[in-house]
Amino acid sequence: MAMALPRVFRTTPFRLTLLFLMVFAAAASIFLGYIYVVTAGAVTSRADQAITQEIQSLTGVYRQGGIKALNRSMVERAAGDRPFLYLLRDKTGQKITGTLEASPVRGFTGAPSSVNFKVTDTDPDGAEVRHSARGQQVQLVGGETLFVGADVSGAETFVLGILRAIWGAGALVILLGLAGGILISRNVNETMAGLNRVVIAVRGGDIAARAKLRGVNDEFDELASGLNDMLDRLERSMGGLRHVGDAIAHDLRSPLSRLRARLELALIEAEAGKGNAEAALVQALEDAEGVLATFNAVLAIARLQSAVEAPDQVRFDPGELAAGVAELYEPLCEDKAIEFKLEATPALAVRGNREFIAQALANILDNAVKYTPEGGAVRVRVRRRASGEVEFSVTDTGPGVPEPDRMRVVQRFVRLENSRSEPGAGLGLSLVAAVAEAHGGRLELDEGPGALNGSGPGLRVALVLPRLA
Amino acid sequence: MRILIVEDDVEAAGAMARGLAEAGIETVHAADGVLGLAAAQAGGFNVLVIDRMMPNMDGLTLVETLRREGDQTPVLFLSALGEIDDRVAGLKAGGDDYLVKPYAFAELSARVEALARRRETGSVQTMIKVGDLEMDLIGRVVHRQGKEIDLQPREFQLLEYLMRHAGQSVTRTMLLEKVWEYHFDPQTNVIDVHISRLRAKIDRGFDHPMLQTVRGAGYRLEA
């Protein structure tokens, strides 16, 4: 029952360990088998060689001295320290001499034949033991049969010893491997469980869940940071979408209720036969235009904020783009007796959405011209910073924005007290900030050049785009 | 002038027809893409005004089909989608202009007229004449009553556009799109300032002003 297994046995690393150990065990078995066959073969052939030599030696004695000499020699040899077993039998099969009682060879035809057999011996403790032995039998010229055997149990014990040692080592390796496998699985398992927890949390709706990095820069950390990165983008995108809804609801309610009130009032007055219906309609149409402009701006900002990056990015010359936008605003400056200057480093390159960046620059310039009093100055600069970033900056000599308010004016609908008399919905800089962010850049607000013609200290607004990759 | 409106919102189409009738434009309405395609294939329209999202067949497919069949009638796309990519997709499919909903009738009729006019002036011109105003497109010089008028390059482009659409209203948005090629709405009406400079150059010192302001719509160059 797979389900009854502890969790750790079901993990991929553990299964891989098991698979590896199985392959290892199979390879080890083949290896051991090979060693056994080779070693055992060597032992047998060495014994066969010794037996053949002994038989040759004995048949030599027989040829020279006949059966008597052979008998004597065998008796001598059996008494000596030669490691052989002997049996000499006459034509009828009766034992003449030897250390064996009967021949282990069955169905002897006269041709020399080899055989494996067992001998029973008594060990020093008096216990009976059976040893492996090997022997050969030949027929002598006079019809007698000569059998010479050798005890091979010593060599076999040696081979078996080697085998046991190797098996033992193998078993140890397998045990260690299993333990290692369990440890690795536990480790991997914990890491994966961490990642899984994040996935489950996100699936459950907690988009803010993040995986912990172990700080070892391995593939798990890579996966974790990839997952976190993906979630960051997703969260931003989802936040942006939610933001669109919130922004539209919040930002359009008040102008729409104003419009509604105006129409309602106009209707009441028209029914009463007083008031100026045409004027009310003109006013209502203007209100509707205002609502529409706000709607477009809010939507553009929210879409930029929810997009991971601005769409349709191309490489272009920022100086050229700035010249185009500046040209649009220059007559406005002249009408207001504002000194206008454009300084652009030629042949720079940036990547971005031309339309959005042009609009952002137009918004900055629009503000600059709007807030700079007559006789002031507006300067547009495009240059590359030492960091490689490209900045579009617009410096004016208007009242500027006090330091504590600078972060605030970028937010939607924030208009400073002294700007309430100017037209606009307070979305201009929010859009610039959204454009900057959608290009991986930023919006910077600083103090301008100081007081000029009784106004100042001015404002310096910079749209900074990242260097080309 | 006769135009085809392909729009599934019947009420909006009715309002559009009334608005365009005020401008002297005759309209025929088709309520979905398939009917619209059949009507367009029957021919006889100066301009096709086509909604992008409709049941049965969307506007893009309709225009792609017409263009494949060799129909070159100018197309103005109407869309509730205002993204840059949507406009690009519309123009790629064979549209000639793109207007985002909601729009002012003045904007719609000005654009329809501009499209219809564009059709009439097919051949390459070297000279444009409106009343006593003459523009030499090769030499890049402008004369009024024989007197040379000194224009900046952008003023020249602006005047060229106005002269090509002489007698028609052109809106500020149209000028911003066609002359400056910007598709955003500047907060301040920068176009007015450019127009007043151009006006000072072509009208000051002459017996009658040519560059008229059309209330609620934009501008018109009259002979």
Image (cartoon, coloured by chain):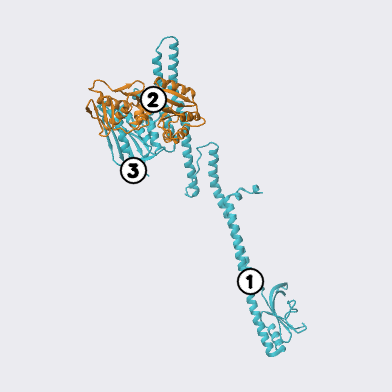
Chain colours: A cyan, B orange
Q: Mark 1 points at which residue?
A: A40
Do marks 1 and 3 both belong to one polypeptide chain?
yes
Disc 1 marks a residue whose amino acid type is Ala
For disc 1, the chain is A
For disc 2, the chain is B
In the rendered view, would you say A28 is above or below A82?
A: above
First of labels 1, 3 by sequence position: 1
Task: Judge by depth and name the residue closer to the eye, A45 or A176.
Answer: A45
Residue A457: image location, x then y, percent:
28, 30
Residue A326: image location, x then y, percent:
30, 32
- Image disc number at residue B188: none
**Label 2: how many Cα within 10 Å (few below 14, some 14–19, many 20+):** many
Q: Mark 3 points at which residue?
A: A388
- Mark 3 residue element: loop
Q: Name the residue under label 2.
A: B107
User: How far apart are the alpha carbons under marks 2 and 1?
Assistant: 104 Å
Say whether residue B46 is left or right of residue B208. Answer: right
Q: Residue at x 63, y 75 (%)?
A: A45
Disc 3 marks a residue whose amino acid type is Gly
